[in-house]
Image (cartoon, rainbow, N blue to C red):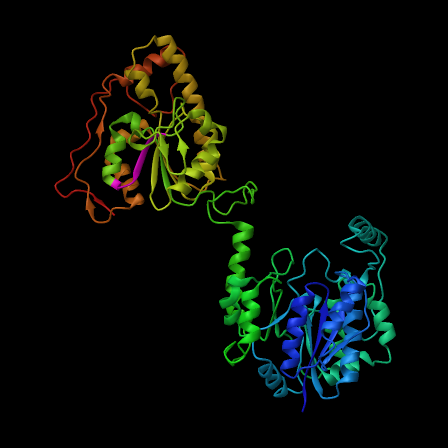
Amino acid sequence: MSTVGVVMLVHTALDRAEQVARHWTAGGCPVALHVDGNVPNATYRAFASALADDPLVRFSRRHRCEWGTWGIVAASQSASELMLREFANVHHVFLASGSCLPLRPVQELIDYLAARPRTDFIESATTADVPWTVGGLDVERFTLRFPFSWKKHRLLFDRYVDLQRKIGMKRKIPAGLVPHMGSQWWCLTRQTLSAILQDPDRAIYDRYFQKVWIPDESYYQTLVRQYSGNIESRSLTLSKFDFQGKPHIFYDDHLQLLRRSDCFVARKIWPRAGRLYQAFLTDQAGAMKRTEPNPGKIDRIFAKAVERRTRGRQGLYMQSRVPRHGAENGITSNPYSMFQGFAELFEDFEPWLARATGTRVHGHLFAPERAEFAEGQVLLNGALTDNPKTRDYNADSFLTNLIWNTRGERQCFQFGPGDNQEINWLVARDPNAQVSVISGAWAVPLFKSNRNFADLRKEAARLQRIESKHLNVLRSHYTKARVRIWTMAEFIEAPMEPIQTIVDEIGLLQQRRLSEAPTMLDLDGFGQFLQNLKNQGMHPYLMGDFPVEQGPVNMPKPPRKPYLVR
């Protein structure tokens, strides 16, 4: 009766390799084992002795195997030749490693391949069609020479590649061969595999591929195109790689994930994943359901894992993934609002906004004296303190941490030219930010203060310079925040319209009527104050065209049909 032969390449965890080998032979599949030449002889002899009682196990000639070198291909050649010579009833040869684990009953694999007696399962794609190469070498791995180990002699490897590129050195590809690449793990028919191993030009091909980089991913993948009449360009082995080209390792908690793949074999299994070996090597009847292998069913999970590792969670910063400026996965995690000039122009603006929107409204988070958290708190979620020295050590991180630690609850805070300005660019670049500015409103507290006019003029000039720079940032073409800027003069002409727009945009309280309006401070005499600044040589231009005789400004009463906050 025909069966499937398994070629196993083993170099570590020999106890697990023995367990898997016995599982294959118990299902009627002969096994040809290649043990890496780097394994100590005493260890090898003990391993061979442990399997000496199994009539379906053979050991091939040993080669020294190192990643990316010819030794791995030579090992598979020796073991495959032994398999074809010793077991005439083998119709397919399945290449596996010592870290591979059968996921379905062995008989299902035998039946599956018996129903496809002329089909070779091997990933085989031209270099132009391979998207998974990592390291910058695709076509060049076939046209340059690689006599040095990439892992042991990286400097020599890189310099020799650079030298070949510089002098234009190129190898000639053997006539008739079109280089192909794919997964190392294949399953070939006896006819195709024997044709590759017995080819009259094999010495030429072997000599050429001995200097190809990572030949185990191209030798069989290229030569199979010479002989096979029916190739399914896919592997029957579930093997996943991360964004760096390193294989994913499966642990005990991947049990259900492996079951969903419906694949026959998976690698790489952690040697101490006892639960996986127990589940798949002992429960023959219920290991997996009979269905077509479909590793694509779990591709979404791996893609999500890669994205999480490379980009992280939106708005989360952590020491193991330091973000590059401009390449963050979201500057912050949630929408938030920054108000500039509103608390200076309206009485009790913060509690009014909290009632109107249902958000948490802070005072000046970046004030020089302290971070003015909502309701006078001194400590906020995530152990954020109101201490200004701690906050200003890294103002950007203070804000992004605050947004992250309070996610699910929209944050609003006040800002002004008297605050720490380090966050200006971060907020401007953040699509989550809603920025509302009444330019020049910082002058109202000066107007209300009872200070020497010379000091007021000096302070007004300083604050105006700071706010002018901030407005330039907000108007930059790099800005991604939702920004609205009004001069103080144009804002007080019709204050309810912009306030309603802002509140509507926050939009947390749906279908709630705005029953009250914020109370604006008495600005009687403010125009004359600005004129006095001009008379003293300071030009207050950010307030807009503010008349000298400016009478009291009163907010309109809410209309009979109040504004709606959507």
- The number of numbered discs placed on residues in the rendered structure image is 0
In the displayed orientation, state which residue is furthest to the bottom.
1
Magenta stretch contains residue 327? no
For this view, does 56 lie left or right of residue 236?
A: right
Q: Which one is in front, 566 or 555? A: 566
Q: Which one is in front, 142 or 386? A: 386
Look at 86% across and 69% down and name the residue there: 207
Q: Quadrant of residue 228?
A: bottom right
Residue 474 position (above or below residue 159): above
- Residue stretch in magenta: 357-364
Position of the N terminus, as image quadrant, is: bottom right
Residue 469 position (above or below residue 239): above
For this view, does 174 lie left or right of residue 517?
A: right
Q: Position of residue 333 (x, y in %)?
A: 42, 45
Q: Position of residue 454 (x, y in %)?
A: 38, 8
Q: Quadrant of residue 165?
A: bottom right
Q: Position of residue 249 (x, y in %)?
A: 60, 61
Q: Position of residue 493 (x, y in %)?
A: 25, 30
